[in-house]
Image (spheres, rainbow, N blue to C red):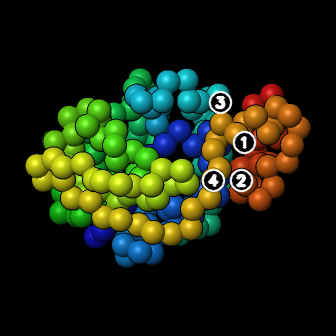
C-alpha cells in the first residue's frame, strides 16, 4: 500500500489543508492518507491556540464520512514536541511493507536540514512536497537517500493564524473551514 501522512497543528483545519491532502492523494495514487496532528511543532513555537482535544475533535468532525482520509492521534497521545522522525519510526513499525510518504509544504524544503535526524527520516519515508503561495521551490535539498516527489495542485493562501484572527474579529470562517469544524469552533467558543 501507498500511505501518505500529513502533519500539522490543524488549529483549525482549513480548506488549504484539505486541498493539499486531496491533491497528494490523487496525484500520487495513495491508498490511504492519514492526518497527524502535532502535539507541539518543533519549528513553530506557540503555533496552537486550542487544546489537543479540541484540535483532534475538529479534525475528526471535518473529515467524518470521507473514506479517503483518517486521523492518527499518535503525536497527541505522545505529547511534548512532535518530531517527524519519531512518528515515522512509529508508522514504519506499524506498516513495515508499505510505501510511506510524508507530505510537506514546499516552504519546508529549505528547512529540511533543520529537521531532527533528517538522514534517518529520509530512509524511512519518501517526501511529497506541495507548492505554497509566496514560497516558490527554487532548489531541492540533497541528503543521502532523500526521495522527493512534487505535487502540483490547487493552492490556497490560507493560514490558521489568519483564521484564528478572523474569529477574534467576529468575521466568518465560511468558505475557509469545513462547516462541521466551524460549528465545533462556535460551540466551544474557540479563539475568542
Closer-to-camera residue (178/57):
178
Of mark 3 and mark 1, the one earlier in the sequence is: 3
Q: Is residue 145 visible?
A: yes
Disc 2 element: loop
**Which mark is in front, 4 or 1?**
4
**Which mark is in front, 2 or 3?**
2
Q: Is residue 127 above or below residue 152?
A: above
Closer-to-camera residue (186/125):
125
Residue at mark 4 to residue at mark 3: CA–CA distance: 22 Å
Of mark 2 and mark 3, the one earlier in the sequence is: 3
Residue extending farthest to the front is 138
Residue at mark 3 to residue at mark 1: CA–CA distance: 13 Å
**Quarter of the image that includes the N terminus:** bottom left
Residue at mark 1 to residue at mark 2: CA–CA distance: 9 Å
* Residue beneath disc 3: 50
Residue extending farthest to the left is 144
Amino acid at each position: 500500500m501507498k500511505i501518505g501522512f500529513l502533519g500539522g497543528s490543524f488549529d483549525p483545519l482549513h480548506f488549504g489543508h484539505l486541498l493539499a491532502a486531496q491533491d497528494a492523494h490523487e496525484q500520487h495514487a495513495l491508498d490511504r492518507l492519514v492526518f497527524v496532528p502535532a502535539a507541539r511543532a518543533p519549528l513553530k513555537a506557540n503555533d496552537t491556540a486550542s487544546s489537543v482535544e479540541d484540535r483532534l475533535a475538529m479534525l475528526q468532525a471535518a473529515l467524518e464520512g470521507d473514506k479517503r482520509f483518517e486521523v492518527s492521534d499518535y503525536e497527541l497521545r505522545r505529547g511534548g514536541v512532535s518530531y517527524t522522525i519519531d512518528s515515522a519510526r512509529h508508522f514504519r513499525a506499524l506498516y513495515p511493507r508499505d510505501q510511506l510518504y510524508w507530505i510537506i509544504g514546499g516552504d519546508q524544503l529549505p528547512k529540511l536540514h533543520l529537521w531532527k535526524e533528517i538522514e534517518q527520516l529520509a530512509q524511512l519515508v519518501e517526501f511529497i512536497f506541495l507548492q505554497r503561495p509566496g514560497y516558490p521551490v527554487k532548489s531541492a535539498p540533497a541528503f543521502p537517500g532523500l526521495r522527493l516527489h512534487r505535487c502540483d495542485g490547487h493552492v490556497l493562501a490560507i493560514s490558521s493564524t489568519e483564521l484564528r484572527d478572523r474569529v477574534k474579529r467576529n468575521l466568518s470562517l465560511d468558505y475557509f473551514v469545513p462547516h462541521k469544524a466551524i460549528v465545533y469552533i462556535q460551540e466551544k467558543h474557540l479563539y475568542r
